[in-house]
């Protein structure tokens, strides 16, 4: 009897002990993971521009895909090759045969990318000064540049037979850079199949025509040409983004407009899924958008081939081309000089912006020598003067000068303003201990640069000038500062023809 009572007491003690132990565990504070819901109010709680992005200033991406095979006209070749009256239509017919016989999908096996080397590309981009990089994951043409289970037209199953995005993601992170993937496929749906008078309209990338493969109902071809039911396409659109987000964990996703073609609720759900996945992965991420596709509190607005005319409170970005004629590689392509690209980038940075620069590889995966040389020259400038660009913030005044900025194609000012040494821009270090005065060219020796804003009674008392040096040297620069004006005298020293930087060391 005593043995039975003893056993009962022991069991009760064990049960009580377990209950107390479980109680202790349940009483431990549980940190709940933040959950973003598919509505603008919830999504607006996410920081639209993480600090790494604000500090980066330069990213590089590239238009490269099946459209790089014909290398004619532009990256819009797959659309225009079906539209009578365009140069692409005539070129295609002359060089590849009638469109009804040789459709766009026939280019896919020719997109072999035999010279593609992700590590080499990323090292080039890093050498050029970029801090984030990545691919156009999918352009309007419906071809996915990743290992997709959703889209049968992808770079692993067809064409290169390689995971382009995966290889680039690995190389980017190996080199301590951030990954961006961009999406342009909202236009891919055939929206005008039942209205012949609207065939070829802008809201559908491929022209529907019963004579062409664009009208095919073949299970595979119909997905490439977007000839599928509307609701099915909307799910197809977002499923592909989800796939890239989950497989490659990009630090930024960017959209080439046309959210107005996608139901708002699906766009909201896509944003929420991305933010929640990033929370789980402990990532600070952003969504780039154009025009009015997202509320300004949710993403970072991008101005294509353009820029702001003044400083903005919210960070912004611009995507620009290294080339002059198109976003993709084409025959006879020409390129901007490094000086033009850098000076316009300095203007962007002075106004709280970030540049996403596009390069255009050939179909075989090689980056032309002319592009490489521009990128090398950019990298050389950043290696000397990068502290005036990276990890900086705007000053009270973005700058002044003589250059006239024309209108940009998509708002703001042009991305190809021809600045001179008479144009000056400012940036400052985040701790406000350094101010950078940047002449967008090589100023004349002995020239006086006047700035009343720097006069003592206008300048914050805790940031008095200790000295001014010509960045890249230790040469001090003569200046005069009193209660009425500030005046700097350009020294007799070696200055940079692209942009010359004077560093103000402040107390």
Image (tube, rainbow, N blue to C red):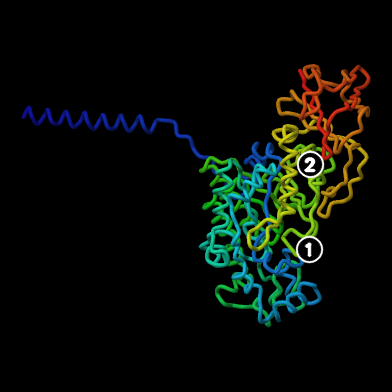
Q: Residue 382 carries which label?
A: none
Quadrant including the N terminus:
top left
Of 184 and 417, which appears nearest the observer? Answer: 417
Q: Is 419 on the left-hand or right-hand side of 267? A: right
Q: Is residue 396 visible?
A: no
- Disc 2 target residue: 348
Describe the element under mark 2 as helix, strand or loop: helix
Question: Residue 376: image x %, image y %?
Answer: 72, 45
Question: Residue 348: image x %, image y %?
Answer: 79, 41
Of 101 and 490, which appears nearest the observer? Answer: 490
- Disc 1 target residue: 332
User: Image point 48% across, 35% down: which residue?
Assistant: 31
User: Image point 59% across, 65% down: which residue?
Assistant: 112
Q: Is 301 on the left-hand or right-hand side of 233? A: right
Q: Can residue 412 be seen in this view?
A: yes
Q: How many labels does the image show?
A: 2
Describe the element under mark 1 as helix, strand or loop: loop
Quadrant including the C terminus:
top right
Label 2 neighbourhood size at 10 Å, few (<14), some (14-19), many (20+)?
A: many
């Amino acid at each position: 009897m005593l043995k039975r009572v003893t056993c009962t007491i022991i069991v009760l003690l064990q049960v009580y002990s377990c209950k107390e132990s479980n109680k202790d565990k349940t009483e431990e504070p549980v940190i709940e993971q933040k959950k973003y819901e598919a509505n603008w109010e919830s999504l607006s709680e996410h920081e639209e521009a993480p600090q790494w992005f604000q500090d980066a200033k330069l990213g590089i991406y590239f238009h490269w895909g099946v459209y790089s095979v014909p290398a004619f006209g532009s990256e819009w070749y797959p659309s225009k090759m079906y539209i009578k009256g365009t140069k692409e239509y005539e070129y295609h017919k002359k060089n590849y045969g009638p469109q009804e016989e040789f459709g766009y999908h026939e280019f896919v096996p020719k997109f072999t990318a035999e010279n593609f080397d992700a590590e080499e590309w990323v090292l080039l981009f890093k050498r050029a000064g970029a801090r984030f990089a990545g691919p156009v994951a999918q352009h309007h043409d419906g071809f996915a540049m990743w290992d997709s289970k959703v889209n049968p037209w992808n770079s692993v199953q067809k064409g290169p037979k390689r995971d382009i995005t995966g290889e680039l993601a690995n190389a980017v992170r190996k080199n301590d850079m951030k990954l961006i993937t961009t999406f342009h496929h909202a236009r891919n749906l055939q929206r005008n199949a039942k209205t012949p008078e609207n065939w070829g309209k802008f809201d559908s990338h491929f022209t529907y025509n019963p004579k062409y493969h664009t009208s095919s109902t073949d299970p595979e071809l119909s997905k490439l040409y977007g000839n599928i039911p509307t609701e099915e396409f909307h799910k197809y659109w977002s499923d592909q983004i989800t796939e890239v987000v989950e497989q490659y964990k990009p630090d930024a996703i960017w959209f080439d407009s046309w959210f107005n073609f996608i139901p708002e609720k699906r766009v909201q759900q896509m944003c929420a899924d991305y933010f929640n996945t990033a929370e789980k992965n402990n990532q600070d991420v952003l969504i780039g958008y154009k025009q009015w596709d997202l509320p300004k509190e949710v993403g970072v607005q991008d101005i294509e081939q353009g820029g702001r005319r003044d400083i903005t409170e919210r960070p912004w970005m611009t995507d620009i081309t290294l080339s002059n004629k198109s976003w993709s590689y084409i025959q006879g392509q020409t390129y901007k000089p490094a000086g033009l690209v850098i000076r316009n980038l300095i203007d962007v940075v002075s106004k709280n912006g970030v540049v996403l620069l596009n390069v255009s590889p050939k179909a075989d995966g090689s980056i032309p020598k002319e592009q490489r040389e521009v990128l090398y020259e950019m990298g050389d400038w950043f290696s000397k003067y990068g502290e005036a660009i990276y990890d900086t913030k705007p000053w009270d005044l973005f700058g002044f000068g003589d250059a006239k900025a024309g209108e940009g194609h998509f708002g703001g000012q042009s991305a190809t303003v021809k600045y001179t040494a008479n144009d000056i821009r400012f940036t400052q270090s985040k701790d406000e201990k350094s101010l950078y005065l940047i002449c967008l060219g090589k100023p004349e020796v002995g020239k006086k640069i006047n700035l009343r804003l720097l006069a003592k009674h206008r300048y914050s008392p805790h940031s008095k000038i200790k000295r001014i040096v010509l960045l890249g040297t230790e040469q001090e620069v003569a200046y005069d500062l009193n209660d009425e004006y500030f005046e700097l005298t350009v020294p007799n020293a070696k200055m940079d023809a692209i942009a010359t930087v004077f560093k103000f060391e402040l107390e």
